């Protein structure tokens, strides 16, 4: 990119929402999604459709998971914030540019898991107004995006291996497995025996601490791509201490809430890789700032997911083809996590990669109605 996130934000405007339609949708998952702190079998998300006077519109998604997962935010709390605070505050108000909208959203003291729905929808609306793709507006090249298979916690080693076969791990460019205390070395040993040399890493979702250093020293011998968020998000000192004792790069996820926090983590030596989630950082602008910080420090990044439904996944893909992204994304085909989805065409995998259609993805109106459980329109 020849511009910075802040200069891009200053150049895109004005922004005015004539109406904001909010919907809650609920879609069954193909299998329970389990991590160290919880399990969910149905995906609920809050969708926002914003529209300006010209008729240009954009979709956004607030895709927090139930309480106890990655954060304290839940679909219920995000729905309440969007309907009760955020949408009424921004609707019919004009902002000089995207920078002004971002400042206003920050001043509301709302969760970024909520404001991301408005921020990302605004960028999509801006792209439609200009007649360009969201990727072009953000200055991201059009290229195929390598995809990785992510597998949640399983009850047994056998169940884990069966899941890898079920989803044909060999169709992907790498695999990530979830671990937690007491369910780690044996899992990795079995996967390594099944997939010798295949790109592999583990995601601990902050379930460990420096007290478990010996576990990661043992895991260090398997030649993995990274240890994703082994310790609590705030424990940068512990992460730095771990990185001094292992060859495997430490990757931050829950720790990567803002560009300032990522910069601090890098300077402390707490990570060598950064996973960016649009939901966690509040949208495209802060994600672009994190990319800038990582590029300045020579730190590779990759695009993670919650996982989101189709709208959030399409937005993640719009940024995931950025040249700074060095590892396959967690965005997978629509059929991987959901029995159905809202996008048309569906997200599909070809030779381990996803290639978004030239015309972009659209929201299927019939499916939107089918899966809506609540709606409200402001403006």
Image: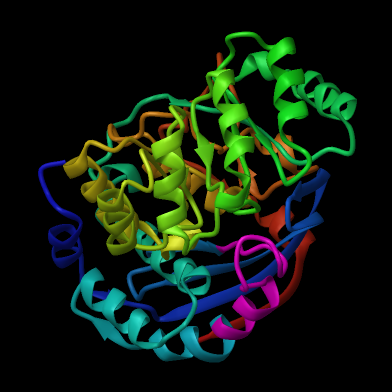
The image quarter containing residue 218 is top right
On screen, residue 19 above or below 120: below
The answer to if 174 sits in the magenta stretch is no
Left or right of 347 on screen, residue 141: left
Q: Main secondary structure of the magenta part?
A: loop
The answer to whether one can see residue 311 in this image is yes
Identify the residue at horizontal 10%, vertical 43% (top origin).
Answer: 2
Q: How many labels were placed on the picture?
A: 0
The image quarter containing residue 169 is top right
- Residue 364 percent location from the top left of the image: 64, 50
Observer-nearest of 29 and 60? 29
Observer-nearest of 20 and 24? 24
- Residue 184 percent location from the top left of the image: 72, 35
- Residue 146 percent location from the top left of the image: 48, 25
Identify the residue at horizontal 27%, vertical 84% (top origin).
Answer: 94
Left or right of 26 on screen, residue 303: left
- Residue 200 percent location from the top left of the image: 58, 23
Left or right of 324 on screen, residue 44: right
Observer-nearest of 101 and 273? 273
Left or right of 270 on screen, residue 94: left
The answer to whether one can see residue 363 in this image is no
On screen, residue 73 above or below 233: below
Quarter holding the N terminus is top left
On screen, residue 196 above or below 50: above
The answer to if 64 sits in the magenta stretch is yes
Identify the residue at horizontal 37%, vertical 62% (top origin).
Answer: 125
Q: Name the image colouring.
A: rainbow
Question: What segment carries the magenta color?
Answer: 62-81
On screen, residue 167 above or below 343: above
Identify the residue at horizontal 58%, vertical 53% (top origin).
Answer: 209
């Amino acid at each position: 990119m020849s511009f910075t996130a802040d200069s891009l934000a200053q150049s895109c405007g004005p922004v005015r929402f004539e109406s904001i339609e909010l919907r809650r949708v609920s879609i069954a998952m193909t299998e329970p999604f389990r991590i160290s702190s919880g399990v969910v079998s149905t995906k609920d998300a809050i969708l926002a459709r914003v529209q300006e006077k010209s008729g240009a519109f954009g979709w956004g998604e607030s895709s927090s998971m139930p309480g106890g997962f990655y954060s304290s935010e839940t679909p219920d709390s995000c729905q309440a914030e969007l309907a009760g605070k955020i949408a009424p505050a921004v609707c019919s108000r004009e902002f000089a540019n995207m920078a002004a909208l971002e400042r206003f959203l920050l001043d509301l003291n709302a969760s970024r898991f909520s404001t991301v729905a408005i921020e990302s929808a605004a960028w999509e609306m801006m792209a439609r107004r200009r007649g360009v793709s969201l990727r072009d507006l953000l200055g991201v090249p059009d290229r195929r995006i390598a995809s990785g298979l992510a597998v949640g916690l399983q009850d047994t080693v056998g169940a884990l291996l069966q899941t890898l076969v079920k989803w044909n791990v060999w169709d992907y460019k790498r695999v990530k497995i979830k671990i937690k205390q007491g369910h780690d070395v044996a899992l990795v040993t079995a996967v390594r025996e099944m997939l010798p040399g295949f790109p592999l890493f583990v995601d601990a979702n902050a379930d460990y601490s420096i007290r478990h250093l010996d576990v990661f020293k043992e895991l260090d011998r398997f030649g993995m791509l990274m240890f994703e968020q082994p310790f609590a998000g705030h424990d940068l000192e512990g992460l730095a201490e771990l990185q001094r004792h292992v060859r495997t790069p430490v990757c931050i996820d829950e720790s990567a809430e803002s560009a300032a926090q990522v910069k601090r983590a890098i300077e402390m030596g707490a990570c060598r890789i950064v996973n960016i989630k649009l939901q966690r950082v509040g949208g495209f602008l802060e994600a672009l700032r994190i990319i800038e910080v990582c590029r300045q420090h020579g730190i590779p990044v990759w695009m993670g997911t919650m996982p989101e439904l189709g709208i959030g996944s399409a937005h993640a893909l719009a940024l995931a083809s950025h040249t700074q992204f060095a590892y396959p994304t967690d965005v997978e085909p629509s059929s991987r996590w959901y029995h159905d989805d809202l996008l048309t065409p569906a997200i599909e995998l070809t030779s381990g990669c996803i290639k978004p259609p030239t015309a972009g993805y659209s929201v299927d109106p019939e499916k939107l109605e089918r899966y809506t459980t609540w709606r409200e329109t402001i403006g």
